Image (spheres, helix red, strand yellow):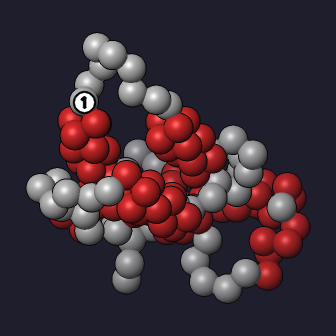
Amino acid sequence: MASATAPQSVPSLYRSFLRVINKWPADPIRPTRNMKTALRSQVTETFRSPLTAGQDTLASRIKDAQVQLEALQKITHNEFKQKYPLSPKLLTPASNPNYYSKLVDMLEKETAKKNFEAIGKKGPTFFQKLFRTAK
């Protein structure tokens, strides 16, 4: 992970952002409008925008970018999910214990209809990773 104190060159920082964005999971429900696409657009636009007089200095923009990169890396490595695990009570509410499992099943069926080639993939699906805990 990039440290907020270690200096990085602009091209190196840009490549680091792209590596993190490439690890970001695609949203199977909205394949053309998802977080991965939005992040890539924002990073590209930000790194292409010139510094103008009166704006932040290059050093301060690099420092801000390093902080943002570190936050994205923590999210992609599931650090917050591991640090703050969801309790089984939250995932299976007493009023409707099967709510989330039914929701995941419904979303997976809809995804399979929209994205037929995803049916044969191995391993847990996007929604299983999102809503189910490891056993």
- Regarding mark 1 in the picture, which secondary structure is present there? loop
Residue 59's place in the image compared with 27, above or below, is above
**Point 34% across, 68% down: residue:** 77
Question: On the rendered structure, is 134 left or right of 122?
Answer: left
Residue 7 placement (x, y as % from top left): 19, 57
Give the residue furthest to the front: 53
Question: On the rendered structure, is 85 left or right of 12?
Answer: left
Residue 93 placement (x, y as % from top left): 37, 51
Residue 35 placement (x, y as % from top left): 56, 46
Amino acid type for the residue under numbered disc 1: Thr
- The answer to which image quadrant residue 54 occupies is top left
Q: Nearer the viewer, residue 80 or 53?
A: 53
**Point 34% across, 61% down: residue:** 73
**Point 50% across, 59% down: residue:** 18
**On the rendered image, what quadrant is the N terminus found in?**
bottom left
Residue 69 placement (x, y as % from top left): 33, 53
Q: Residues within 10 Å of mark 1 (few under 14, many from 20)?
A: few
Q: Nearer the viewer, residue 82 or 97?
A: 82
Residue tagged 1: 57
